[in-house]
Image (cartoon, rainbow, N blue to C red):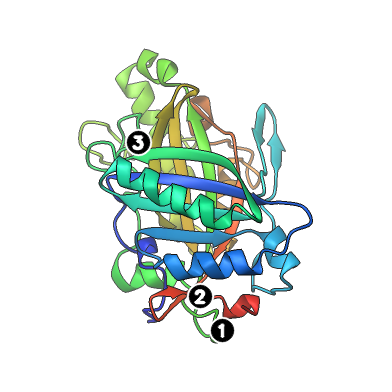
Amino acid sequence: MTENHQQGITEPAPRLARYMILSLRPDTEPRQSLKDLAGVVDGSNCVVGIGESLLKYLGADIPGMHSFPAHSVAGIDVPSTPAAIWCWIRGEDRGELVHASRTIESLLSPDFELVKIIDAFQYRDSRDLSGYEDGTENPKGNDALAAALMTGQAEGLDGSSLVAVQQWLHDLDYVDSMEDEERDHMIGRRLSDNEEIEDAPESAHVKRTAQEDFEPEAFVLRRSMPWADESGEGLVFVAFGKSFDAFEALLNRMLGKDDGIVDAIFRMSQAISGNYFWCPPVKDGQLDLRALKL
């Protein structure tokens, strides 16, 4: 399996993170800014993704890349919020993350506008703020590489990844108001020991997103992290894949598009953003942008 991927994709989630979302300024020529970014990003301390509109501007054809689809079902909206660049800065010291983001913003500022910053963190042993473990069913080892990375494509594509990124806003007051059994049945696991509940309702989140139950199996590599600020709190959901097929199968099942059963997770949380990005491979210690003709 290829080793020329951005290592932050397959490394464990860090203690702290900062997500940067940037848009392309009108009437600019971004190629030099992207080359400058490639020179300072190693794919480990910072993972970079490039959005569909910027790929189209550069004339790049990335297999499987397309825009994030917006969804509406009864009482639930899942938005699409496209962007040009996504940076996931990873580390242990918040001050270092601030300085890293300032460096990136300065490099890109001639051609890109910083739209949003989300500061995230690890809660306990990689738990969601609801208290439940996150990413329990993540593939491991070679299975993780196979799920997350493109192979058998071409130079400049092998080792790259497609990533789905959503910011979810939780209603933790509602979670706190629930009885233990009701809350466990909403998730499909017991909070006390993380064991799956066999007789949980079909709407339980674990049952709706059991990756091995799909045909073909819908495995993604999750690297989600909690966030909290003055606007609220929730989860930055991050799922890497060799394509978007697995993520879209999971999301469609959550929305009940195949059987009409909506995931109970929507009782406590709502998606407030939705993005797809292509994460380039790495060559000689920096981003490999050959697929962008750079």
Q: Between marks 2 and 1, how big is the CA–CA gap?
A: 7 Å
- Circle 3 — which element? loop
Q: Are marks 3 and 1 in contact (CB under 8 Å)?
A: no
In-front residue for pair 268/165: 165
Structural crowding at the residue carrying mark 2, measured as other residues with C-alpha within 10 Å and reported as few (<14), some (14–19) or many (≥20): many
State which quarter of the image contains the C terminus.
bottom right
Q: CA distance from mark 2 to mark 3?
A: 29 Å
Could you give the CA–CA distance between mark 3 and mark 1, rounded to whole angstroms?
35 Å
Residue at 58% x, 66% y is 34
Indicate the amino acid at tag 1: Gln
Residue flagged by tag 2: what amino acid is it? Answer: Met
- Estimate the x, y position of residue 33 in percent, counting from the top left: 59, 64
Which residue is labeled 3 in the image? 128
Amino acid on which disc 3 is placed: Asp
Pointer 2 with pointer 1, Cβ within 8 A: yes
Q: Identify the residue position indicated by label 2 in the image.
A: 150
Sequence-wise, the earlier of marks 2 and 3 is: 3
Query: Badges 2 and 3: C-beta atoms under 8 Å apart?
Result: no
Residue 92: image location, x then y, percent: 25, 47
